[in-house]
Amino acid sequence: MTNSSSSGLWILICGFILGITNPFLLKAQETRPSQHVVLISIDGFRPDFYLEEKWPAPNLQEMAKSGARALGVTGVFPSVTYPSHTTIITGRTPNHHGIFYNSPFEPTGQTGRWYWESELIKVPTLWDGVRKAGLKSASFIWPVSVNAPIDYNLPEFWSLEQGFGRIDPMREKETPKGLLAEMEEQVLGKVNERTFNGDYLNREDRIGEMAGYVLETYKPNLITLHLIATDHFQHAEGRDGPMVRKSLAATDRAIGKIIEAADRAGILDQTTFIVTGDHGFVNIHSSISPNVWLVEAGLMEDRADRGKWKAAFHTSGASAFLHLKDKNDTETIKKVQSILENLPESQKKLFRVLNREELKAAGADPNAVLGLAPIQGISFSPSSSGAVLKPAKGGTHGFFPDFKEIETGFIAWGAGIRENVEIQKMGLVDVAAVVDYLLNLKMDLPQSNLYPGIKK
């Protein structure tokens, strides 16, 4: 018998033992560095959470020490949740994937809707790659995941109808139908607005329990999940508030639940955990309302629908982006540029103006005429009335991603990852290439680098 025949026979025998009837699937499984990847996004994740022992995060710190860790991860512009998460899941910047902000700019006034539906993503996602490879995926509260090609999906979604809340809309968009009810029966207890609420830390526990249950029960090849508490409390208290510490501890505990689930399922040695985030955080003290300038110049009205408008600033986190009713209206562009150039020096020094070419280089919204990026401590506000400069407090993000405090983090630990690897600098676009390598998806990721030093 030839060597190739022996190899083929051995694959068939192993497949029979493992219950895999397709020998080609078994061969593909043999070539994957990892069988299960758990991709965790911690909203507002900062490198100091795992690099400094003062923070209550024993799981994260142990994973960082024994796996691969980044000293800082450069995000996208604006550095807010939905564009960032879509960059993680696609390996592309917003100008390629099409999710430019949390909320799309709506010419007739902002309705409160966000970029929820996965159909809005213009490039393939890791979920697409997993399905194309014949593998299974699961996802929990991940942005822009409604209707995504995910086998077990509880997407982030809520209703704009007053009183409709978040639980029922999320249940309506789940895949398969009955998934949340199954998890309520098996592990969670009844989920409602009181027991699954971003104002309280039990939400993190429950997301960890959901992901752990599905990993242990169905063993998907890719799980994506989004933990929000650290973002919520950094907005309220700034970078170092008491609830920030408690929220990080809750997040770390949720991750521990998933690790334990992999251990109980007997798949921990075949599983890789990737922990990353969408942005860092900056303490703020003041806000600027640039639409007040436009109202005073007669370029928009102080109304919810903007009235008879020609130009409007769409704020996203700390930054602001100029949109025109008529994209060819050069006269209005000149008027706005003149407004900005003639501001008092005391205001001009609080931000920089990014022209169209600079926005393109940053991978930002191609529909924006220009952008305003504030200095640390300052945030732009959507308000179109009152004083231009107002007091503010707490923390925020959305800044241009070119300084340390706005960087997010990255940890890779488990199957297929070398031990004790330090990455001085990487981009958020690079996370997708790590997942692609671990699951051998062979996706086209032209903006995403896989650093070979992390490969086992």
Image (cartoon, rainbow, N blue to C red):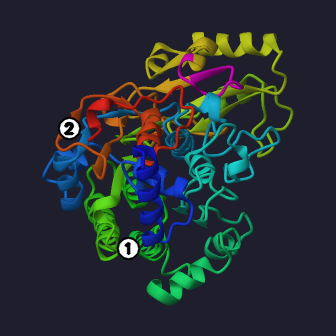
Verify CB contact (< 8 Å) between mark 2 and mark 1.
no
Instruction: Report the span colored magenta.
Output: 361-371
Q: Residue at x 57, y 35 (%)?
A: 387
The CA distance from mark 2 to mark 1 is: 29 Å
Answer with the quarter of the image where residue 233 lies: bottom left
Q: Residue at x 56, y 51 (%)?
A: 130
Q: Left or right: where does residue 204 sit relative to residue 93?
A: left
Residue 235 visible, this angle: no
| Mark 2 or 1, closer to the camera | 2
Which x, y percent locates residue 206?
A: 43, 75
Answer with the quarter of the image where residue 68 lies: top left
Nearest the viewer among 432 and 25 is 25
Q: Main secondary structure of the magenta part?
A: loop
Residue highlighted by disc 2: 421
What amino acid does circle 2 point to?
Answer: Val
Q: Is residue 116 above or below residue 398?
A: below
Which x, y percent locates residue 253?
A: 28, 68
Residue highlighted by disc 1: 205
> Is tag 2's residue or tag 1's residue first in the polypeptide sequence?
1
SS type, badge 2? strand
Which x, y percent locates residue 446?
A: 54, 26
What amino acid does circle 1 point to?
Answer: Asp
Query: Few, some or many C-alpha atoms within 10 Å of disc 1 (few <14, some 14-19, many ≥20)?
Result: many
Answer with the quarter of the image where residue 367 lies: top right
